Image: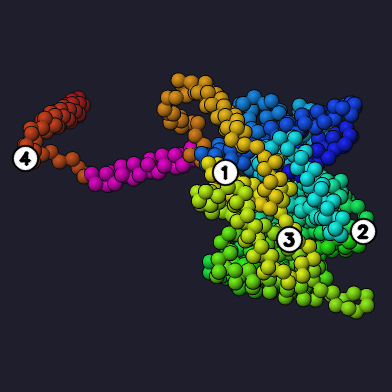
């Protein structure tokens, strides 16, 4: 949404080109040449459509992911690489690299391809954009038209002007920083951080005339993302490195784009440190539970190295916030949050000056029993507002400022459908919701909120009204600005069907390619490799087995020689055998010949001897 609104607020070609340069998904879009003012709106609309086309609708993403996770990952890569016009065979090769060797190796291969196609400078820039390319439309942005977004932009500007004229301070929340869209793992323990969109959002807020709040990645959502990616307690030092370095880059980007105009701005340093929805009510700190990183670790190893930048921003009227959610869950949840806030003030005095109560409530929170929990939250907020974190130059106590940081009331999909089935129109449902909000207003009337933030369509929790027949498992939100939201939305089914058709077309092309590559020879069962093609280790093992068998054979032969008699005995062939044996007759014949030869020789010797004697 930030990207689209930033485009709409571009007023000249220079700003449009700067916008193109900042948007990862437009890596093949050339700078726009100088043109007349009448065509600027046409150019912006074309770029809006191009950016919209680069994303996959939220509902289509769900359907694609539900079939085959590996296949879905391959399609998302295809979406990123689409404008490079690579052959499908090359895309499949890159898929295999990513799946077998990991993202860092894949990114290096993509950079190599881009450099070969476009040269070092342009190729490296394109590769970086491809890496940061976002495939998913998290906010159903691509179900809206350019004209609807223009109308929405005008309504937001009116709200800001109305707030500011009444003496308020309208603040846009820039919640673009998470692990997945900020951190790129380059391998070998190195990471790269991207803050292009958050910097763009700072410029948007300045143009609209509002202040803003930027969020760091020290949030529960980031912890969950990193945990899902395989980070564990054994990676504690790596996780600390990522948090420390990303915070540094975020603060540098924030500082370089801030106007030193005295306006109050906020940096949300901690978001949801405490776990949510714990059935056993044994709440823990998220970073400690996931990665063994204690609150002391966060302060000494993540915050302390960046204190110079934090102090510099404080001099520009930037305040630092700790923001928590779902305080109505239980007494134990509130106790853990208060304990954490007190500990923060003790370890790092004056660091946190604002506590934010994310005032998310649900239809179920307005039962008689749960209303008591909401009343307890109001008392908790009042107590938090009395916390002292320092003293001013005159020695007076400085108390923590408290804000209602994200007020909204959700009606679940089930509840919305039930109300519709009872015959209520959308307008009647809004009145029903407003009645609950009135109860909420009475409960929190005495809480000294410095600022009250209503979620609107500038964030993904935007008050979308999901029709009953839409295929979604998400809760249906009926927001305060639903009428504005309806103005900025159109039927999403056409876009979902289009995205799914493109996915199925890609899937079919891959299938056809694999069929062409599969020759009759490849389809035959694979025969065992010849021995001489086996590994050296296999050959050595086989050689050892062969030598051992030969040794056993020789040993057996030696044993047989030991068992043989030294004089051969002639036996009756029929003595021990049932079948007659002719070997005995052969032996007798040989023996008779030997005896005849010996007798003949002796007779010759005697004859010669006697003959000599007579002479």
Residue beneath disc 2: 262
Q: Is residue 561 magenta?
A: yes
Look at discs 3 and 4 and give the one toward the viewer.
Answer: 3
Q: Give the main secondary structure, helix, strand or loop, of the magenta stretch.
A: helix
Q: In the rendered image of this protein, does residue 188 appear above or below residue 150?
A: below
Q: CA distance from mark 3 to mark 4?
A: 113 Å
Q: Disc 2 or 3, which lies upstream in sequence?
A: 2
Q: CA distance from mark 4 to mark 2?
A: 126 Å
599 and 241: which is toward the camera: 241
Q: CA distance from mark 2 to mark 3?
A: 21 Å
Q: CA distance from mark 1 to mark 2?
A: 45 Å
Q: Disc 1 or 3, which lies upstream in sequence?
A: 3
Disc 3 crowd rating (10 Å Cα; few below 14, some 14-19, many 20+) is: many
Residue beneath disc 4: 575
Residue 467 numbered tag:
1
**Where residue 323 appears, x then y in whole percent?**
72, 63
Seen in the image, is 497 located left or right of residue 194? left
Residue 405 numbered tag:
3
At 75% across and 35% down in the image, what residue appears? 147
Residue 557 numbered tag:
none
Residue range (magenta): 539-564
Q: In the rendered image of this protein, does residue 398 appear above or below residue 596?
A: below
């Amino acid at each position: 949404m930030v990207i689209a609104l930033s485009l709409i607020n571009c007023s000249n070609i220079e700003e449009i080109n700067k916008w193109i340069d900042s948007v990862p998904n437009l890596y093949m879009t050339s700078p726009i040449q100088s043109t007349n003012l009448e065509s600027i709106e046409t150019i912006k609309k074309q770029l809006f459509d191009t950016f919209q086309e680069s994303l996959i609708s939220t509902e289509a993403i769900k359907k694609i992911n539900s079939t085959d996770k590996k296949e879905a990952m391959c399609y998302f890569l295809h979406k990123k690489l689409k404008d490079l016009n690579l052959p499908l065979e090359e895309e499949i090769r890159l898929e295999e690299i990513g799946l077998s060797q990991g993202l860092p190796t894949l990114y290096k291969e993509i950079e190599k391809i881009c450099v070969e196609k476009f040269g070092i400078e342009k190729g490296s820039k394109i590769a970086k954009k491809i890496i940061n390319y976002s495939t998913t439309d998290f906010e159903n942005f691509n179900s809206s038209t350019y004209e609807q977004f223009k109308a929405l932009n005008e309504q937001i500007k009116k709200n800001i002007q109305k707030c500011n004229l009444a003496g308020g301070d309208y603040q846009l929340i820039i919640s673009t920083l998470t692990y997945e869209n900020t951190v790129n793992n380059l391998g070998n323990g190195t990471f790269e951080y991207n803050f292009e969109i958050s910097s763009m959002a700072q410029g948007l807020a300045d143009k609209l005339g509002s202040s803003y709040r930027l969020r760091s990645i020290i949030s529960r959502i980031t912890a969950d993302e990193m945990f899902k990616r395989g980070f564990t307690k054994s990676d504690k030092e790596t996780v600390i490195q990522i948090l420390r370095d990303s915070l540094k880059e975020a603060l540098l980007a924030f500082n370089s784009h801030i106007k030193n105009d005295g306006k109050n701005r906020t940096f949300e340093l901690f978001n949801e440190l405490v776990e949510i929805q714990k059935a056993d009510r044994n709440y823990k700190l998220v970073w400690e539970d996931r990665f063994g990183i204690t609150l002391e670790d966060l302060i000494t190893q993540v915050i302390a190295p960046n204190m110079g930048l934090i102090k510099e921003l404080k001099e520009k009227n930037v305040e630092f916030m700790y923001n928590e959610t779902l305080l109505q869950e239980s007494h134990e949840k509130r106790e853990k949050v208060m304990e954490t806030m007190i500990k923060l003030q003790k370890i790092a005095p004056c660091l946190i000056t604002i506590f934010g109560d994310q005032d998310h409530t649900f239809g179920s929170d307005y039962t008689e029993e749960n209303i008591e929990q909401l009343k307890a939250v109001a008392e908790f907020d009042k107590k938090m507002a009395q916390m002292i974190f320092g003293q001013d130059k005159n020695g007076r106590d400085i108390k923590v400022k408290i804000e209602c940081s994200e007020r909204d009331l959700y009606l679940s999909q089930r509840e919305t459908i039930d109300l519709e089935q009872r015959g209520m129109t959308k307008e009647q449902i809004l009145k029903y919701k407003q009645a609950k909000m009135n109860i909420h207003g009475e409960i929190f009337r005495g809480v000294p909120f410095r600022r009250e933030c209503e979620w609107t369509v500038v964030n993904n929790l935007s008050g979308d009204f999901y029709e009953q027949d839409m295929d979604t498992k998400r809760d249906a939100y009926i927001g305060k600005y639903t009428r504005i939201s309806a103005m900025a939305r159109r039927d999403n089914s056409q876009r979902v069907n289009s995205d799914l058709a493109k996915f199925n077309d890609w899937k079919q092309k891959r299938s056809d390619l694999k069929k062409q590559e599969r020759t009759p020879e490849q389809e035959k069962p694979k025969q065992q490799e010849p021995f001489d093609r086996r590994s050296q280790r296999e050959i050595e093992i086989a050689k050892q087995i062969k030598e051992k068998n030969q040794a056993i054979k020789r040993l057996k032969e030696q044993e047989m020689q030991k068992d043989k008699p030294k004089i051969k005995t002639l036996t009756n062939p029929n003595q021990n055998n049932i079948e007659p044996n002719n070997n005995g007759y052969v032996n007798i014949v040989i023996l008779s010949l030997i005896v005849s030869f010996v007798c003949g020789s002796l007779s010759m010797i005697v004859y010669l001897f006697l003959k000599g004697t007579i002479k």
